[in-house]
C-alpha cells in the first residue's frame, strides 16, 4: 500500500487528527517532518493538516511555507500528484503559491469556531470525490485568518477557470465570493478552510467528512 | 545612610515578608538571611506558593482520596484511574491578579501554566475549561477586561491545540474591582503511558533546564499575586508582564511527552510561580536529596540578568528535569528537534542541601525543607459556621409577570447566551469532542474505550452570597447533578478557592466552611478531590469579592449513545419535574431584585447524593429525550432555556410565580416520549410532577401570554451584544 | 494637514514571541540575524499639522494604539515623499 504523507511543522496541531482520519480511510499515513525532504514516488498523496504552524507568527502559514519540506511538496505537486491543505495547510499552500489567493484575518476580527454549511461548486476528482456540483455538506470551521482574498483580476480567473471547490452558504468570515476552498490550475492541489476530519464519525456531530480521500 | 532597622523594614516591604516571618527565618537559619536568600524566602513563603493560610485546612481533602487515585501524595495532581488502563489528571488554577493588570496576557499565561501542570505528569492535555467572574459592565475597564480575557484564553488555547470545551461566566458587582480568571486543564494517560513524578532521585543525576530562555518576566510575580491591590498599584505599577507563547508551549508539550514516554526522565517539574526557585526547591525537598544549581548556565534572554532575576523569573514555557547522565544526549536531541533548549545546569547530590552557584562561587547553601516543609503554617482565626442567613420562611413572590422577567433575564449578561465567548474557542481539535461548549456539560470521547468523559465547572456566587457552606456544597453537587441528568457519574473534583483576605475572621470562616463542605460533598458522592489551588487577597481597598470556591468536576458515562439533549426536541412529549427538596433559596431572582439573600431548610447531604444516583438511572432510559437541571433563575428560566431551539412548551400545571422563580436544592426536568413508562420507572419516594407538554414554536407559562421560541432565542443570542458585537 | 508614522515595538524586557519565531526561520535558511523584533506600523493622516499635529498623533498612540504595559512607540512626521 502506498503511503499518505502528513506534513508536520512545529506548531501543527491537527496532525494526529489527520493521521487517524487517513487511517480511517484504510490508507497508510506517515508523518513527514518539516526539515526533511521526501521522494514523490513514495507517496500516493500529501496532506497538510490544520493548526498553528510557527504560531501563525508574521502571517499564517508564512514561515511554514518557507520550510525545507516544501521543496519536496512543490516537486510532488508539479508532477500532478494530489495535495490537500486543510485550514492552516490551505494557508501554507497559498503562501507557497501552490494555490491562488491568500487567507487573511476574519472580517469581524475574531477567531470563529462553528459548524458551517457548504456547497460544492466544482467537484474534485480525488478529494471529496463522492460529492457532485451543488451538493451540500456541513463541516466545522475553526480559524482566525480564514477570509479568502484575491485581487479582482485573479479572482475572476479563479472563477472562470472553475477553480472554486467549495463555497460557504452563510459567509462566516468575509471571504470573497463566499469561497471556502479552491484548487490550482492543474487541479491536483486543493485547499479548504473547513475541517473534514472533524466530521468523520457520528459522535463528532456529523459525517460529511467521511470517505473524503 | 539608612539605619539597620530602616534597611530591614525596606527589605520586609520589598520582599513582602512579615516581622514574624523574618524572625522565623533567622531562627531556622540560625543567622540573618544573606542577600540572595531574601528572594528565595519571599517567593516560596508567599501565600501563592506556600499556601500558608490554607494548608492546615486543605489537609481535610485528603480524607476524600480513595483507591481510584494514584500518586496522590506530593504531586501536582492525583491521577484518577478510570479503569481499562485509562487515567486522567486535571487541575484548576487562578490567575486573577495578573489578568486584572493585563487581561490578555494574564489569561493566556493562566492557560499556559495550568497546561504545564498536566503534561509535566506525562498526560497529554485533552481539554481546557475556564471559570470567569466579572463585574458590572459599567464599572471601570470591565468591557476591556472581558474582551481581553476571552481573547487571551482563545489565542493561547487555540494555538496550543487543546480544545476549550466548557466554562462558566458569572457577573456580579462584587467582582467590580477584582475579576476572577480560573483555568482548568484535563489530561489523559492511555494504557501503558508512564506517569512522570517530580521528586529528585538518583545521586549524580543531571538537572536539566528545558524550554524558553529566562528573561525578567514577572520578577516578584508570586509575591504580587499574594498582595491585594492598593492605591499605588495600577498605572504606576508597570511590572514586567509575563508573555505567554502558545507556540512554544506546543513544542514543549510534544517534546516533554516524547521524553517521558521514552522513559528518559527520572523527574520533571514545570517552572510556574517563582520559576526556577519553586521547581528546584520542591523537587529537592520532595526527593529529600540535594541539588547543585549553576545559575550562570541558565539560558538567558539578555546578559543583564542577575542571579536574583534568574531565581525569580517567571518566564513562561520552561521545565526542570532530572535524568541519568547517560540519557542526556538523547533528551537533548529530542528537544533540539523541537527547537528548544535543553541545558544541564546542575547535579543531584546526596547531602540534602541546595547549593546555588554563580560562576563557581557559592551564593548560598540551604536545606530545601526550610523553605518548603518549614514554610509558615498559619492557623488563622475563624468561627464555626452558623448559617446567619437561614430563615424559617422565605417571603412569597407574587404579583409578577414571570414571562417578562424571563425575557429580561435571558437578555442580560447574567442569563444570556455565552456563544459570543465560546465561539472564539476551538472546541474540536483532537477529534474527541462530542458535546462542545454549547451544551451544559461537555463530553469528550475517550479514544480507547469509547466511553464519555464529562467536564463541568461549579460554584454559583449568588448562592455563596446567601450562605458559604450551602454555596460550597452546591459547587460540588450541582455539576454532579448536571452530569447525572445526562446519565453520567462524577468521578473526581478539582477546586480553585477564591477568597478575600484570610486575615479577616469572617472571610476565614467562610473559607473553612467551604473546605469542609466540599470535603463532605466529595465523600458523599465518592468523587475525591485530587488537586486544587487557593487564591487569597482578592480585594481592593478593603472591598473583597464574594467568596468563590470554584470547582471543576470530571465524570464518566459508559456510552455516548442516547445522551439526553439540553433542549426540547419533539412535539407532544411530556415534561416532568423531579424534586428532592430540602432547601429553598432566594436565588438569583432574589439577588437581582435586591432582596435579602436568604434560604430555608436543611441541606441533607446523603439524601442529595441518593437523589443524584436515582436521577442518573432515570436519565439512562431510552424514553428520555431531553433533560435539565433547574438552576439559576428557577423553573421558568429552565423551561425557557429548553425552548430555545424551535421546540417550546405549554405548561399546564398551575404553578405560582413563587414556584416558578425560587431555586430549590434540587430540581430536575425530564422530557419523555412515553409518560406512563416514565412514571413507572420513577422510585416511589421521589416527588414527580407533570408540568405540561412540548409544543412547536411557543413558550407558554400558566396564566400568561405565550411568546414565540424565536423571540426568546433572539433575546438570548443578543445578550452580549454590547461586549462582543455579535455579527 | 500632515501625516504621521507610529512604530510600535515590544518593550525591551518583554518577550517578543513573533520575533523569536522569525529569527528561527531565518536561521534555518542560513540568513542568521543577531535579533529580530516584530511590531506594528501605523500611518495617521491628520487635519492638524506642526506641533499640534504631532501632539495629537502622540496622544493617539499613547491612549489607543499602544499598550504601555508591553509596548513602546515612536512618532515620526512624514513628509510627502515618504509613502509606502
Image (cartoon, coloured by chain):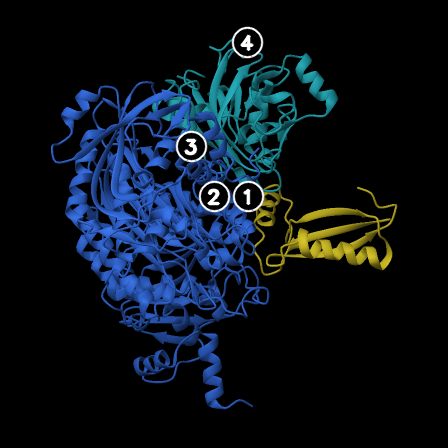
Chain colours: A cyan, B blue, C yellow
- Viewer-proximal residue, B628 or A123? B628
Report the residue at 47% width, 25% height from top: B710
Residue at image mark 3 = B428
Q: Give residue B659's position: percent from left, percent from top.
A: 29, 39
Could you classify mark 2 by the number of other residues whose Cα lies within 10 Å: few (under 14), some (14-19), or many (20 or more)? Answer: many
Q: In this view, does A147 lie to the left or right of A23?
A: right
Q: Residue B561: percent from the left, percent from the top?
A: 27, 24
The chain holding disc 4 is: A
Quadrant where the N terminus of chain A lies?
Answer: top left
Q: Quadrant of residue B175?
A: bottom left
- Is label 1 on the same chain as label 3? yes
Label 2 and label 1: CA atoms lie apart by 9 Å
Give the CA separation, mark 3 to mark 4: 28 Å
Q: In this view, does A154 lie to the left or right of C20?
A: right
Q: Is residue A50 visible?
A: no
Q: Distance between the residues labelled 2 and 4?
A: 43 Å
Quadrant of image for the C terminus of chain A: top left
The verdict on a common chain for dots 1 and 4 is no
Residue B723 has which mark? 1
Amino acid at each position: 500500500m502506498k503511503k499518505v504523507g502528513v506534513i508536520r511543522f512545529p506548531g501543527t496541531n491537527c496532525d494526529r487528527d489527520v493521521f487517524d482520519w487517513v487511517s480511517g480511510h484504510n490508507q497508510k499515513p506517515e508523518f513527514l517532518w518539516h526539515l526533511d525532504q521526501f521522494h514523490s514516488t513514495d507517496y500516493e498523496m500529501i496532506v497538510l493538516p490544520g493548526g498553528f504552524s510557527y504560531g501563525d507568527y508574521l502571517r499564517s502559514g508564512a514561515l511554514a511555507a518557507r520550510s525545507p519540506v516544501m521543496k519536496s511538496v512543490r516537486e510532488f505537486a508539479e508532477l500532478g500528484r494530489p495535495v490537500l491543505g486543510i485550514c492552516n495547510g490551505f494557508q501554507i499552500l497559498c503562501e507557497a503559491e501552490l494555490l491562488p489567493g491568500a487567507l487573511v484575518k476574519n472580517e469581524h476580527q475574531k477567531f470563529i469556531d462553528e459548524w458551517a454549511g457548504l456547497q460544492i461548486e466544482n467537484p474534485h476528482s480525488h478529494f471529496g470525490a463522492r460529492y457532485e456540483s451543488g451538493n451540500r455538506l456541513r463541516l466545522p470551521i475553526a480559524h482566525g485568518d480564514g477570509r479568502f482574498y484575491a485581487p479582482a483580476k485573479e479572482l475572476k480567473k479563479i472563477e472562470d477557470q472553475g477553480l472554486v471547490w467549495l463555497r460557504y452558504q452563510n459567509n462566516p468570515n468575509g471571504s470573497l465570493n463566499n469561497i471556502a476552498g479552491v484548487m490550482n490550475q492543474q487541479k491536483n492541489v486543493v485547499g479548504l478552510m473547513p475541517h473534514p476530519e472533524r466530521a468523520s464519525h457520528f459522535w463528532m456531530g456529523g459525517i460529511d467528512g467521511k470517505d473524503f480521500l | 545612610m539608612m539605619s539597620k532597622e530602616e534597611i530591614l523594614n525596606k527589605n520586609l516591604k520589598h520582599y513582602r515578608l512579615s516581622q514574624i516571618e523574618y524572625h522565623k527565618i533567622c531562627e531556622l537559619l540560625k543567622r540573618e538571611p544573606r542577600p540572595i536568600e531574601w528572594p528565595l524566602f519571599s517567593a516560596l513563603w508567599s501565600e501563592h506558593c506556600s499556601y500558608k493560610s490554607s494548608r492546615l485546612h486543605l489537609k481535610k481533602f485528603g480524607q476524600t482520596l480513595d483507591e481510584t487515585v494514584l500518586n496522590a501524595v506530593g504531586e501536582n495532581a492525583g491521577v484518577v484511574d478510570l479503569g481499562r488502563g485509562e487515567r486522567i489528571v486535571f487541575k484548576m488554577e487562578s490567575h486573577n491578579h495578573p489578568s486584572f493588570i493585563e487581561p490578555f496576557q494574564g489569561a493566556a499565561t493562566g492557560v499556559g501554566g495550568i497546561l504545564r501542570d498536566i503534561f509535566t505528569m506525562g498526560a497529554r492535555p485533552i481539554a481546557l475549561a475556564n471559570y470567569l467572574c466579572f463585574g458590572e459592565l459599567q464599572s471601570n475597564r470591565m468591557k476591556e477586561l472581558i474582551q481581553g480575557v476571552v481573547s487571551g484564553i482563545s489565542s493561547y488555547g487555540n494555538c496550543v491545540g487543546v480544545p476549550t470545551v466548557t466554562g462558566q461566566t458569572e457577573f456580579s458587582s462584587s467582582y467590580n474591582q477584582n475579576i476572577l480568571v480560573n483555568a482548568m486543564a484535563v489530561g489523559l494517560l492511555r494504557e501503558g503511558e508512564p506517569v512522570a513524578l517530580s521528586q529528585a532521585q538518583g545521586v549524580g543525576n543531571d538537572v536539566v533546564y528545558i524550554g524558553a530562555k529566562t528573561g525578567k518576566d514577572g520578577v516578584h510575580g508570586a509575591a504580587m499575586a499574594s498582595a491585594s491591590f492598593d492605591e499605588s498599584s495600577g498605572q504606576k505599577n508597570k511590572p514586567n508582564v509575563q508573555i505567554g507563547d502558545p507556540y512554544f508551549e506546543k513544542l514543549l508539550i510534544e517534546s516533554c511527552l516524547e521524553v517521558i514516554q521514552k522513559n528518559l526522565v527520572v523527574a520533571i517539574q514545570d517552572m510556574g510561580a517563582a520559576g526556577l526557585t519553586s521547581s528546584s526547591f520542591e523537587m529537592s525537598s520532595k526527593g529529600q536529596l540535594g541539588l547543585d544549581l549553576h545559575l550562570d548556565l541558565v539560558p538567558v534572554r539578555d546578559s543583564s540578568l542577575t542571579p536574583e532575576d534568574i531565581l525569580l523569573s517567571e518566564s513562561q514555557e520552561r521545565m526542570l528535569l532530572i535524568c541519568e547522565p547517560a540519557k542526556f544526549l538523547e533528551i537533548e536531541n529530542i528537544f533540539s528537534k523541537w527547537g528548544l533548549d535543553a541545558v544541564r545546569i546542575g547535579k543531584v547530590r546526596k547531602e540534602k542541601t541546595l547549593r546555588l552557584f554563580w560562576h563557581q562561587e557559592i551564593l548560598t547553601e540551604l536545606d530545601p525543607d526550610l523553605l518548603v516543609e518549614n514554610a509558615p503554617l498559619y492557623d488563622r482565626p475563624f468561627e464555626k459556621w452558623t448559617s446567619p442567613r437561614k430563615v424559617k420562611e422565605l417571603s412569597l413572590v407574587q404579583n409578577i409577570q414571570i414571562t417578562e422577567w424571563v425575557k429580561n433575564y435571558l437578555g442580560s449578561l447574567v442569563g444570556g447566551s455565552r456563544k459570543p465567548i465560546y465561539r472564539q474557542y476551538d472546541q474540536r481539535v483532537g477529534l474527541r469532542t462530542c458535546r462542545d461548549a454549547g451544551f451544559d456539560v461537555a463530553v469528550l470521547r475517550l479514544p480507547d474505550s469509547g466511553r464519555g468523559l464529562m467536564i463541568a465547572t461549579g460554584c454559583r456566587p449568588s448562592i455563596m452570597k446567601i450562605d458559604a457552606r450551602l454555596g460550597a456544597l452546591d459547587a460540588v453537587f450541582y455539576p454532579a447533578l448536571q452530569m447525572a441528568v445526562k446519565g453520567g457519574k462524577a468521578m473526581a473534583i478539582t477546586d480553585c478557592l477564591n477568597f478575600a483576605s484570610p486575615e479577616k475572621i469572617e472571610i476565614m470562616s467562610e473559607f473553612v466552611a467551604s473546605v469542609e463542605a466540599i470535603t463532605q460533598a466529595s465523600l458523599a458522592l465518592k468523587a475525591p478531590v485530587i488537586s486544587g489551588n487557593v487564591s487569597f487577597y482578592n480585594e481592593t481597598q478593603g472591598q473583597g469579592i464574594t467568596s468563590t470556591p470554584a470547582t471543576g468536576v470530571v465524570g464518566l458515562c459508559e456510552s455516548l449513545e442516547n445522551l439526553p439533549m439540553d433542549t426540547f426536541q419533539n412535539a407532544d412529549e411530556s415534561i416532568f419535574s423531579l424534586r428532592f427538596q430540602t432547601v429553598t433559596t432566594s436565588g438569583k431572582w432574589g439577588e437581582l431584585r435586591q432582596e435579602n439573600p436568604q434560604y430555608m431548610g436543611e441541606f441533607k447531604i446523603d439524601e442529595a447524593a441518593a437523589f443524584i444516583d436515582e436521577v442518573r438511572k432515570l436519565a439512562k432510559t431510552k424514553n428520555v429525550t431531553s433533560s435539565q437541571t433547574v438552576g439559576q433563575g428557577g423553573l421558568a428560566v429552565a423551561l425557557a432555556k429548553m425552548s430555545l431551539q424551535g421546540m417550546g412548551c405549554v405548561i399546564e400545571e398551575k404553578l405560582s410565580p413563587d414556584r416558578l422563580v425560587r431555586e430549590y436544592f434540587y430540581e430536575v426536568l425530564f422530557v419523555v416520549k412515553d409518560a406512563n413508562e416514565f412514571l413507572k420507572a420513577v422510585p416511589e419516594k421521589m416527588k414527580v410532577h407533570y408540568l405540561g407538554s412540548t409544543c412547536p414554536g411557543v413558550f407558554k407559562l400558566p396564566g400568561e401570554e405565550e411568546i414565540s421560541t424565536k423571540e426568546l432565542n433572539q433575546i438570548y443570542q443578543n445578550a452580549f451584544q454590547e461586549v462582543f458585537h455579535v455579527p | 494637514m500632515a501625516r504621521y508614522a507610529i512604530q510600535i515595538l515590544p518593550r525591551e524586557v518583554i518577550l517578543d514571541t513573533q520575533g523569536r519565531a522569525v529569527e528561527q526561520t531565518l536561521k534555518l535558511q542560513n540568513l542568521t540575524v543577531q535579533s529580530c523584533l516584530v511590531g506594528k506600523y501605523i500611518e495617521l493622516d491628520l487635519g492638524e499639522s506642526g506641533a499640534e499635529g504631532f501632539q495629537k498623533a502622540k496622544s493617539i498612540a499613547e491612549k489607543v494604539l499602544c499598550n504601555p504595559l508591553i509596548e513602546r512607540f515612536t512618532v515620526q512626521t512624514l513628509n510627502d515623499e515618504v509613502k509606502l
